[in-house]
Image (tube, rainbow, N blue to C red):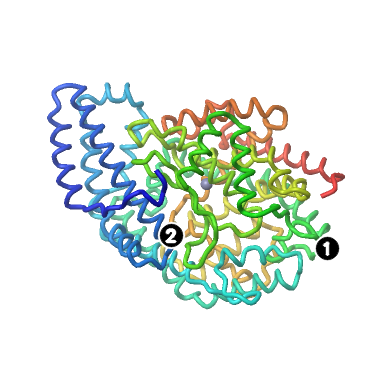
Amino acid sequence: MKFSEMSYTRPQVQEIASQAESLKKRFADARSFEEADAALMKWDSMIAHVDTMTTLAYTRHSIDTTDPFYEAEVEYIDEQSPLITEIQESFVRLLTESRFRAQLEEKYGKLLFLNAEIFLRAFSPAIIPETQETNRLETEYQKLIASAQIEFDGEKRTLSQLQPYKQSPDDAVRHSAWQKEAEFYTDHASELDEIYDKLVKLRHKKALKLGYDNFVRLGYLQMNRNCYTPDDIAKFRRAVVQYIVPVAEKLYRKQAERTGLAYPLCYADASLRYRDGNPRPQGTPDDILAAGKRLYHELSPESGAFIDMMFKEELMDVLSKKGKAGGGYCTQLADYKAPFIFANFNGTSDDVEVITHEAGHAFAFYMARDIVPHDNQSPTLEACEVHSMTMEFFGWQSSDEFFGKDAVKFRQSHLFGAITFIPYGTMVDHFQHIIYENPDMSPESRHEVWRELTAVYMPWLRLDGSPFYGEGKAWQRQLHIYECPFYYIDYCLAQTAALEFWVIMQRSRKEAWERYMKLVRKAGTQTFTELLATAGLLSPFDDNALREVAEAAEKWLDSQEHVSA
Ligand SMILES: [Zn+2]
């Protein structure tokens, strides 16, 4: 079914509650495993339906944030979703305590139950008021960012639409675009500080109510961390500083030489990879989509069928327009067994990423669409990012089509970006650990923390006290810091695994695809580290993983120096 034809009805909490009561009774009263299983399946499809309606509302709202209908629906859902979580909690508790648990574990896997227990530890009805308030503040942040109307190059532009200018090879244009962006954030500095301050304090309060010392533990539970701890992450951080930062620093020094810009680089100069400009996709958005379609057909029959469905059912909204929320994401509509891709094409290489990265997520969902219970369809988020970030590297085989004469530049700068992203992302996560361990920190001290971390993780950047960026406020652009605490490290863990796949692709694309499909086929039935083992990859918590990918990437990029870009 086409996205536009999918019908939305408000998920009414009263109705859900009464259905839940009867299903809970059915499950609790089950006299056999079969009866319990049947009740679980009924429950699963009810929750999948609620989830589908919620996703439809959020997605349509993000496509047009000015549409009053979906604005009201999102407001309603923000308000009601913690009540729905409470209803879920009561069923999940029954599930974990079921006398048929052993048989259910045998049928659906033990991980489902481990995850259920983590979910229970992260929730109590006592935190509903704070959750409602954080939902409201998160929406407020999103609206504030979407409201940007920046006068630039003769038109009012959103932050996404400003993006191409921020990479312009014309130094004056590029600097002015960064300046304009900084002005927008500076104009809203007090709102941005205030929203975050409230969010930190609300999250801390929730953690205390649940019996934790601070939000870190709760944040990990909310992210459903089922195979690693803050200590593992601290170890990963040290390996990033040891193995990745020096390579990244060398790459940026070379970039400064190539572009003739002063090192350490200011933010605006760090974003220019080549003197004559960053790689740009060739052709129109339709050309990019068409090249993407061919790519998925070349990769495998499964991915070919997948991409045909995405086009036929119009499951992508990728053009930037006024009122549309920023960023890009992939989501899924369980009732329709359909993924959906949201993006803002802007004429940069980001557009290609939509068709590789976001469609990588969508492909994994498509492959898992028949698995029940629905919770077994998707693994934890870092594993989902392995799906997408690895697909970006499979996209290299179409880089000539996507980028034409800029294909060489694209491959170099993609790998450059993959390596240099890891320190940034790790810093975003490290920042949040410090913030949530010190919930009473003032906004000014938070900016100071960001400045200090920047010196460790991104020593190639010059912090010179210029407005916004130089003041250590750049974290305020990072939606995840506001909306999805502790999410960001997932990208770094996933990037490490994706780079391991890239290393395999260098010797055999076929082998890499087969190992990738093994991982994708396991969907949500294994933990992140188990999935990596399934694909025969090292865990990112093994220092060797970062060391090996850093060495391989450095070697490859060195070998590219004579290749004219
Ligand atoms: Zn992603």
Name which residue lies at 23% across and 52% down. Answer: 125
Residue 6 location in percent, x, y?
A: 35, 48
Does dot 1 land on a helix, a strand or a loop?
Answer: loop
Closer to viewer: mark 1 or mark 2 = 2
| Amino acid of disc 1 | Gly
Residue 223 location in percent, x, y?
A: 41, 46
Q: Does 40 appear above or below 230? A: above
Name which residue lies at 67% across and 45% down. Answer: 242
Instruction: For label 2, count other residues whose C-alpha is less than 10 Å away and answer few (under 14), some (14-19) or many (20+).
Output: many
Residue 260's tag is 1
Instruction: For label 1, count other residues whose C-alpha is less than 10 Å away and answer few (under 14), some (14-19) or many (20+).
Output: few
Q: Does 266 appear above or below 27? A: below
How far is disc 1 from disc 2 in space, using C-alphas?
40 Å
Figure disc tally: 2
Specify whether residue 333 is in view.
yes
Residue 202 location in percent, x, y?
A: 34, 62
Specify whether residue 246 is in view.
no
Q: Quadrant of residue 240?
A: top right
Which residue is under mark 2? 62
> Dots 1 and 2: beta carbons under 8 Å?
no
Name the side, left or right, on which 312 lies relative to 374. right
Name which residue lies at 57% across and 37% down. Answer: 540
Name the side, left or right, on which 563 lies relative to 104. right
Residue 243 location in percent, x, y?
A: 68, 43
